[in-house]
Image: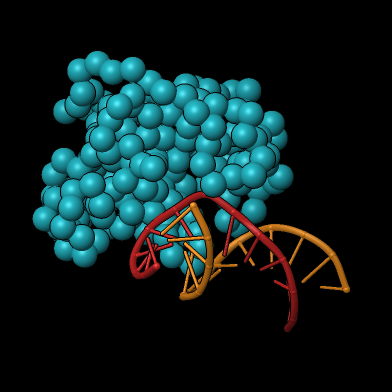
Chain colours: A cyan, B red, C orange
DNA sequence: CACCCGATTATCT
DNA sequence: GATAATCGGGTGT
């Protein structure tokens, strides 16, 4: 098994968003291994993207989006949930991140069921706030290194052999709807909505 | 310091 | 399908 390295994330944000599909997100917590296959992502850029948290400037909330690629950006939203992003952008941009929107649960499913208080596998990780709760990811993980084994990392191996990618407008935003930066594995049952 | 609002979810009907 | 819950950050006074 190989952990994705920093060069993977120093490319165009929308390209990385597509390349993350089919990869495996892993979190080890108190000796329990939790993981899932990424089946849905969204790209958020910089000054060209009014939907992005990094649209205006660097603040105490969004600074991780301007930081090292291959690190995490975790934020709290709607008083309910955490959203997990991977910082990724190329040399033409000062910021960017990929929001992980849905997973297919792979390992540690019983732990996830208990954490989510839900039995159905489909209720565990089909949404950005659900999957952070299922994997035990909180704001403590903001800015954390993902390209080494720190307990939270991404595995290179494609867990799915081959698939088509669907591009669509992003969810839950008012501006930037012209960009087709929501990516998902075609016809995958664990895509949200 | 007050006001506003959001990259969502759960829980109804 | 509609709506309430809920809270931290950003903005301006």
Q: Quadrant of the N terminus of chain A?
A: top left
- Residue A102, position in %: x, y? 34, 41
Residue at (16%, 40%) from the top-left corner?
A106
- Compared to residue A17, the image places residue A127 above or below, namely below
- Residue A13, position in %: x, y? 51, 28
- Residue A155, position in %: x, y? 25, 31
A101 to the left or right of A118: right
Where residue A180 sits, quadrant-wise, is: top right
Residue at (31%, 58%) from the top-left corner?
A133
- Compared to residue A2, the image places residue C9 above or below, namely below
A89 to the left or right of A22: right
- Compared to residue B3, the image places residue A22 above or below, namely above
Residue at (17%, 63%) from the top-left corner?
A114
Is residue A101 something one can see in this rendering? Answer: yes
Front residue of A183/A122: it is: A122
- Compared to residue A31, the image places residue A188 above or below, namely above
Front residue of A72/A174: it is: A174
Residue at (54%, 47%) from the top-left corner?
A172
Where residue A17 sits, quadrant-wise, is: top left
Q: Quadrant of the C terminus of chain A?
A: top left
- Residue A10, position in %: x, y? 48, 25
Is residue A149 something one can see in this rendering? Answer: no
Front residue of A76/A182: it is: A182
A186 to the left or right of A181: left
Give the number of marks. 0
A169 to the left or right of A164: right
């Amino acid at each position: 098994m190989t952990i994705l390295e920093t060069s993977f994330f120093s490319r165009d944000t929308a390209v990385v968003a597509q390349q993350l599909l089919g990869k495996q997100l892993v979190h080890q917590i108190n000796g329990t291994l939790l993981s899932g296959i990424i089946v849905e992502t969204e790209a958020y850029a910089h000054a060209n993207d009014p939907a992005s948290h990094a649209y205006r400037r660097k603040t105490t909330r969004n600074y991780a989006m301007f930081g090292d690629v291959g690190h995490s950006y975790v934020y709290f939203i709607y008083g309910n949930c955490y959203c997990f992003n991977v910082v990724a952008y190329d040399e033409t941009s000062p910021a960017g991140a990929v929001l992980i929107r849905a997973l297919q649960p792979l390992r540690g499913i019983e732990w996830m069921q208990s954490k989510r208080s839900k039995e159905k596998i489909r209720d565990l990780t089909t949404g950005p706030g659900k999957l952070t709760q299922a994997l035990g990811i909180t704001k403590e993980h903001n800015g954390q290194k993902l390209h080494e084994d720190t307990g939270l990392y991404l595995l290179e191996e494609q867990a799915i052999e081959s698939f088509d990618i669907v591009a669509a407008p992003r969810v839950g935003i008012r501006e930037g709807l012209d960009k087709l930066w929501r990516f998902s594995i075609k016809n995958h049952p664990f895509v949200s909505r």
